[in-house]
Image: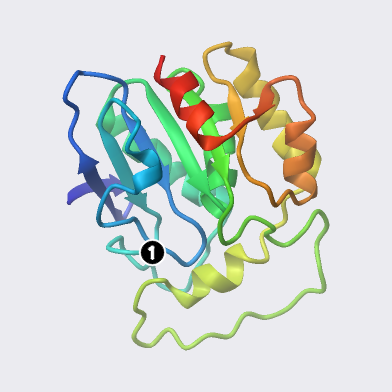
């Protein structure tokens, strides 16, 4: 396990497979409440380069902060820290919440992200396109064990308006080397809006891996 710093947070970056040919790395981003796989998933075996997986803040072996404060933008910072460590062009593959974070990161870091693959997984729907009834999140965080209950409560309520996601898709598409592949079959409103954009292409996971490996 590689330790990467994001502010006061220590993130766990796992190398699932080392590179054998110097190809571009693939960075796996897990779904809400999950953690990085301990072994290379079979569906990612065709990727020719190194494969890494990142535990988001409050998940897996990464630091659990005090009193929550989770947002999608916080997780973008997690991925950005991993990108800085890898220090090369990277393709992102996200599942569920990780797919949303992969899309946003592709928009803000199109200089190093060479493709974002959006797959099904927990947290895909989020809180919907509009704010819900205000609530006070009360969790027992006296002895937090990942996943942090604050992460589950706050990120599951995170508002994800379609036009916000679309803007990031356009940012990614502005750099022709940062396309977005929509693999997920479950498509909440934000993801359907993304799939309808010129910069996003619906395809299978196998086709996406082949396309971005070139």
Instruction: Say above or below: 140 vs 130.
Output: below
Quadrant of the drawing holding the C terminus? top left
Q: Is residue 171 left or right of residue 37?
A: right
Q: Is 86 or 201 nearer to us in this picture?
A: 201
Q: Is residue 39 above or below residue 145?
A: above
Residue 127 occupies which quadrant of the picture? bottom right
Q: What number of labels is visible?
A: 1
Q: Residue at x 82, y 73 (%)?
A: 133
Query: In the rendered view, would you say 56 is above or below 83?
Result: below
Secondary structure under the numbered disc 1 in the rendered image: loop
What's the colour scheme? rainbow
Residue at position x 34%, y 86% in the image: 143
Q: Which residue is mark 1?
A: 59
Crowd class of label 1 (few under 14; some 14 to 19; many from 20; radius 10 Å): many
Q: Residue at x 41, y 41 (%)?
A: 79
Along the line of sight, the residue nearer the viewer: 174 or 193: 193
Residue 90 image-quadrant placement? top left
**Coordinates of residue 68 in the picture (x, y in percent):** 49, 69
Question: Closer to the camera, 141 or 210?
Answer: 210
Residue 84 as seen in the image, left or right of residue 194: left
Q: Is residue 11 above or below residue 157?
A: above
Q: Position of residue 88 (x, y in %)?
A: 30, 21
Residue 129 placed where, x, y %?
Answer: 81, 53
What residue occupies the far top of the structure in this picture? Answer: 176
Q: In the shown orientation, is residue 63 left or right of residue 162? A: left
- Residue under the point 31% across and 31% down: 84
């Amino acid at each position: 396990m590689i330790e990467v710093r994001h502010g006061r947070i220590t993130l766990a970056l796992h190398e699932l497979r080392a590179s054998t040919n110097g190809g571009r790395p693939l960075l796996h981003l897990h779904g809400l409440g999950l953690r990085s796989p301990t072994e290379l998933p079979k569906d990612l075996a065709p990727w020719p380069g190194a494969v890494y997986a990142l535990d988001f803040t409050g998940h897996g072996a990464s630091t659990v902060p005090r009193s929550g404060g989770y947002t999608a933008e916080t997780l973008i910072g997690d991925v950005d820290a991993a990108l800085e460590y890898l220090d090369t062009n990277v393709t992102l593959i996200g599942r569920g919440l990780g797919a949303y974070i992969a899309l946003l990161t592709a928009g803000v870091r199109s200089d190093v992200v060479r493709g974002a693959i959006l797959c099904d997984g927990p947290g895909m729907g989020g809180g919907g396109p509009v704010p819900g009834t205000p609530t006070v999140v009360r969790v027992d965080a006296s002895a937090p064990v990942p996943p942090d209950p604050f992460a589950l409560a706050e990120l599951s309520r995170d508002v994800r308006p379609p036009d916000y996601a679309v803007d990031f898709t356009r940012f990614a598409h502005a750099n022709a080397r940062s396309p977005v592949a929509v693999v997920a079959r479950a498509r909440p409103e934000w993801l359907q809006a993304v799939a309808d954009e010129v910069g996003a292409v619906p395809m299978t996971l196998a086709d996406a891996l082949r396309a971005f490996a070139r």
